[in-house]
Amino acid sequence: MTRLVGAELLKLRTTQTFWGMAAAAIGLVLLIVVLSVALDADPTEENVRTIMATAGFSGVLTLVLGGVVGAGDYRHGTIAWTLLITPNRLRATAGQFLAGGVAGLAIGVAAYAVAAVIALPWLAAKDASFPPAGDLLEVFLGSVLYAGLAAMLGAALGALLRNQVAAIVVVLVQIFVVDPSLAGLVPDIAPFTLTGLGAAMSGVGSDNDLLPAGAAALVWAGYAVLVAVLAALHTARRDI
Amino acid sequence: MVTSVLEVRDLTKRFGTNVAVDGLTFTARPGKVLGFLGPNGAGKTTTLRMLLGLTLPTSGTATVNGRPYRELHDPVEQVGAVLEGPQFHPGRTGRNHLRVLAAAAGLPRSRVDEVLRLVELNGAGHKRVKGYSLGMRQRLSLASALLGDPRALVLDEPANGLDPQGIRWLRDFLRAQGADGRAVLVSSHVLAEISQTVDEVLVISRGRLVAQGSLDELTRGVEAPVWVRSPDAERLRTALSASEGVTAEPVQTGEGWLAVRGASLEEVGTTAAESGAVVYELYRPAQSLEAVFLELTGATEAGR
């Protein structure tokens, strides 16, 4: 499995699509952080924590990236090579799924690092009051985990739908239409929507209605595995 | 030496009401190049994809060394495949494409450069695939198929897009693979492309096997007409047509020429003598492979 994940990561690294989307994810986080710091006249402990938690926004972007790369194998026809070398559909899907997770984690780490390098010295210059290092570490781990899990779910969804545009549309509709609608209609469900789970993991805001970050990660991982298994079963039953 | 046998038994594939492959049975053995011929849409690609586990059969079996492809543990060492259609990310270099496959198969990176050299693509390995010609893409496909040094090759229209030099290169290449003990199954819709390479051919049309054997056997099965030139063509024609199963048609191209089917040279000569028709020329041209192919596949097409 290690060699399959390695091959899938090499597949990502050897296309411009991946680097472009990773750069976009990191750039967007950077933009949000810069604006937040610039517009914050009085950076309190809570504000600093929230600013650093915006790095977790990379999770939404790795979700989209996962969808694009997960369906990319079908778009370019490279799926045939993938399955010729690894005919077991479950193994092949698992390789892509885990590689998506590793790529997502890496993007999460990079996004947080960029945010920290820019924001922390700047905030210090603005005489900000910093939360304890433990809090910032928690925000770091949460946002990185979110980015990794989001990319895994995206990759599974891409493999299931086999179409990049469809994968992006489903992700966007889910986050911007379905999640808010569900949260409005049935507030009890809100913590279990992708938006609610993402917020819980990255530590954006301090909504007490959200799940604890660890529990949110487990629920999200459950969604991701479920979609991945569906994708593997689907691939096993369909012609390529 | 480890060998691979490709076997297809009663293989059928239906897409809705359309029967793409209809009860096909054949075996590709080590050391032989088996040509898989038929017009476009005859079911060749579907058959090969079923053999490679990419398309699921409706019924029947397709196996490599007795097992379905999907159950093979190290398929790249048993079968190498060249498929039709898009199969590369345009932005990835040829060499990186091969590196990904080698990594997934657990093959050393040195193998990538070896196969690039083997298909004479080593100069273009660092170029992105979108800059490749059709022929270069075919070579990259072949390089991919050869990565695991497989004991069998399944090649779907590998000559597509190759220039005459490329086709000659492919012929030599395929012959060498067969001579090396590999089982080679190669499809084509143009008989001439592979006629000098194959040991045996299968001809399919509309998903069914219409002929199987060596090229000699096939050309013998479908005989060319006897050509005869006579100043008494009309009298000769009447005399020949009197025998059951014999047809004699005037040939547009020449004065006094008849094309006679259903009779041997001797029978035509005897009939001419008996009818008193003078004969200037009498011969049977060598049947062209292309004509045989068209006759074999066209007959079933017209019959439906």
Image (tube, coloured by chain):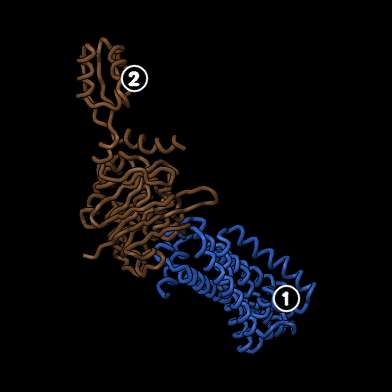
Q: Give the residue drawn at x 76%, y 79%.
A: A188
Asked if labels 1 and 2 touch by Cβ distance under 8 angstroms, the answer is no
Of circles 2 and 1, the one toward us is 2
* Visual hue assigned to chain B: brown
**Amino acid under disc 1:** Asp
| Res A217 quadrant in image | bottom right
**Amino acid under disc 2:** Glu
Q: Position of residue A25 (x, y in %)?
A: 59, 67
Q: Give the residue drawn at x 29%, y 43%.
A: B194
In the image, A105 versus B274, the foreground residue is: B274
Q: Give the residue drawn at x 74%, y 80%.
A: A42
Query: Numbered disc 1: what chain?
Result: A
Q: Is residue A114 visible?
A: no
Image chain in blue = A
Q: Pointer 2: what residue?
A: B249
| Res B301 quadrant in image | top left
Q: Position of residue A23 (x, y in %)?
A: 55, 65
Question: Which corner quadrant holds the N terminus of chain A?
Answer: bottom left
Q: Give the residue drawn at x 36%, y 70%.
A: B73
